[in-house]
Image (cartoon, rainbow, N blue to C red):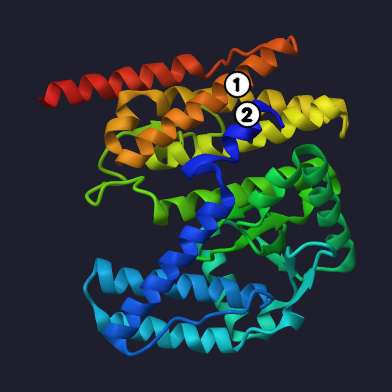
Amino acid sequence: MSKARHLLSTGPFGAAAGIHADMATFSEIAAELLHAHTGLRPPSPAPDAALIAHSVARSTTLDAFRALHGRGDPADAARILRRGAQLFASAAPHTQLTVPGHTYALAGDWSAVEGGRALRAVIGEDLAVAHSHVAATPDHVTAVGRGLRLIEAAVGEFGLSIVSSVRGAVLIEDSIIESAFIVPAPFVSVLNTQVLASPLKTADAVLHEAAHQKFYDLLVCRRLVNPDYNYLGGALFGIPWNPVAGERRRMDCLRVLSTIHVYAHLLELLLSVREAGLSDRGECDGMLTEYWQRAQFFDTAVRSGVVRTALGPDARAMVDWLASVMDVHRETLAAAGRDAESPYTADALEQVHRFEAEAAALV
């Protein structure tokens, strides 16, 4: 096992089994509190329940708990629980196809059941760009299976442990979105069918979105943000690539942390694929160069005092953990004779210095 992979798979931020166990404990405690205040409990799916059932159950638990604990509104919590039970009851195994040898499922025609329609509505609202849903076919299952086998061949149980953070995916097409993670639809990744043409791109998209779920599980069971964290009231970093309507996209400090967390995982996949010669060298090298250069922007930003002071105590420890992973990735690239510099590092530093100057002026 590589040094970076060992780091990524151990400790309070890396060990997937520990994170899953902590989330299960949180769900049990939340269910008891909700029952005590509303007389109702969130749905509790069996391990082999349908993707819809798992997503509805988790979102119902989280939404109802926020209503009770965050807003102090047991009546709204009860409403959410009743609605969740209604959606949960509509879930059925025939709404999906499962990848053989895995628990990863692909959504079928979710318009046929109420829970599926509700999740598709949530996904559509979050994507906010043109797209159309596609019911999974055996060919799609075969393509995703190739991607999962590539993950296993490249990074072994570590990769599969990340994938286990989700339960599967819905497929879309006719969209600029290649893949996505939708916070209000837990356990469900969004994959554009175009990424399924390449096993490497499939593996990359599957691992990418599962790593996002892993991070949001950490957000529930680790102190990554302080109770008074203001997502849009603090530093907002401008991303120097892929502007929208001529304007830079903006990311708050928590999203910067989330993004470098994902890149740290994807770089381990690509470096391992390249070393073992498991994919087309040109395709892998192109993705590796792009990801490394972008990762340096987020790595530079997240190590700064701007991000460290904005987030919670566990986030600062997480920054140190990710920094150690990125340092190992840099050493690996250098040993392979690849350029470890990035055209985006100076841009990140300029923004960090600007935020620091603005903060000092307020003192």
User: Label 2 sits on what residue type?
Assistant: Ala
Where is residue 227 drawn, in percent x and y? 24, 52
Q: Which residue sits at x=42%, y=31%?
A: 319
Q: Is residue 272 above or below residue 51?
A: above
Q: Residues within 10 Å of mark 2 (few under 14, many from 20)?
A: many
Q: Quadrant of residue 76?
A: bottom left
- Observer able to see residue 128: no
Q: Is residue 359 left or right of residue 211?
A: left
Q: Is residue 259 left or right of residue 265?
A: left
User: Label 1 sits on what residue type?
Assistant: Val
> Which mark identifies residue 328?
1
Viewer-closest of 12 and 351? 12
Q: Quadrant of the N terminus?
A: top right
Q: Which residue sits at x=36%, y=79%?
A: 32
Secondary structure at badge 2 equals helix
Q: Is residue 237 left or right of residue 76?
A: right
Q: Which residue sits at x=37%, y=39%?
A: 315
Q: Quadrant of residue 90?
A: bottom right
Q: Quadrant of the C terminus?
A: top left
